[in-house]
Image (cartoon, grey):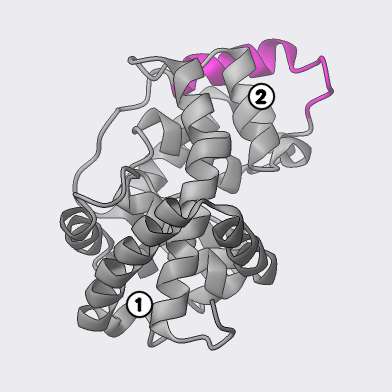
Amino acid sequence: MTKSPDIAERALRAVAEAHRWDRAFEKPIESMLGKNRHFDEASLRAVAREFMVTRTLRWEEKGGGEELTQLVKVLNSLPLTWGGKLQVHYLHLVDTVSGECAALWEKTSFHSALSKFYMFRTGRRWPPFDSHAANALGVPQGHKGNPRAAKFYKKLDGLEFSQTCEDIRKALAHSLDIPAERVLDKFLLVDGMTTAAVMADSYFHTQPEETQRKMQKAAEMLEAVFKKRDQWVRQ
């Protein structure tokens, strides 16, 4: 892969990084949750560890106690699917979790962690909030009354996130067995996070030739989607 930041290279990096995360982290966590996508303490900690939000939640290595137990209970009560605007649904999630887990939420408003837990609750269809993805979209900083995560989801709504994911799903139906939402997430991350781009390049070059060819084919299909939906590259 060259170093030019064009759509073609960004698409290939997104495919490679989505493939890497799918195999190394996300599918193993999905296996822990099972078909019902139910969390327990071990799977909750696995998500927190792999997505680096443990410090945000301020858990001790072997602690958590009642707060962690309550969070597991609340997460397992959240809907497996959603409809309508992302921002509206996210604010509803925040109301639910902050109300049911008030003690933990008062310590730290874990918007990023919540979005990543919910991503697995929805079979990796929900887009997680990440500061690097937000940077790629030019989302401004937030404050207590209007957190950056809420602005992030409003931005995704405006960019037609759900419709774009359907286009990606159709384009990659025969070339990549990874949720379209995860590919779009990586398309943002490799632009907003230098280390993600570097890791994608490295991972691609370590793959067998056949896997590389499949990734390149998927990237060509993805590039066509983003040339049509160029609002994602005009930030």
For the stretch drawn in magenta, the main secondary structure is helix
Which residue, given by chain and number where applicable, does mark 1 sit on? Answer: 232
Q: Mark 2, residues whose alpha carbon is within 10 Å: few (<14), some, or many (≥20)?
A: some
Q: Residue at x 65, y 18 (%)?
A: 68
Q: Are marks 2 and 1 in contact (CB under 8 Å)?
A: no
Q: Which mark is residue 5?
A: none
In terms of depth relative to the viewer, which is nearer, 9 or 116? 9
CA separation, marks 2 and 1? Answer: 33 Å
Q: Residue at x 62, y 14 (%)?
A: 41
125 above or below 190?
A: above
User: What's under tag 1, amino acid-wise?
Assistant: Trp
Q: Mark 1, residues whose alpha carbon is within 10 Å: few (<14), some, or many (≥20)?
A: some
User: What's under tag 2, amino acid-wise?
Assistant: Arg
Q: Is residue 115 visible?
A: no
Q: Residue at x 46, y 75 (%)?
A: 10
Could you tell me which secondary element the residue under label 1 belongs to?
helix
Spot the residue most to the front.
209
The span shown in magenta is: 59-75
Give the side of residue 107 with respect to residue 105, left or right.
right
In the image, is residue 202 part of the stretch drawn in magenta? no
Q: Dividing the picture into quarters, in which one does residue 167 lie?
A: bottom left
What x and y, as percent, mark residue 93? 41, 38
Which residue, given by chain and number where applicable, does mark 2 sit on? Answer: 45
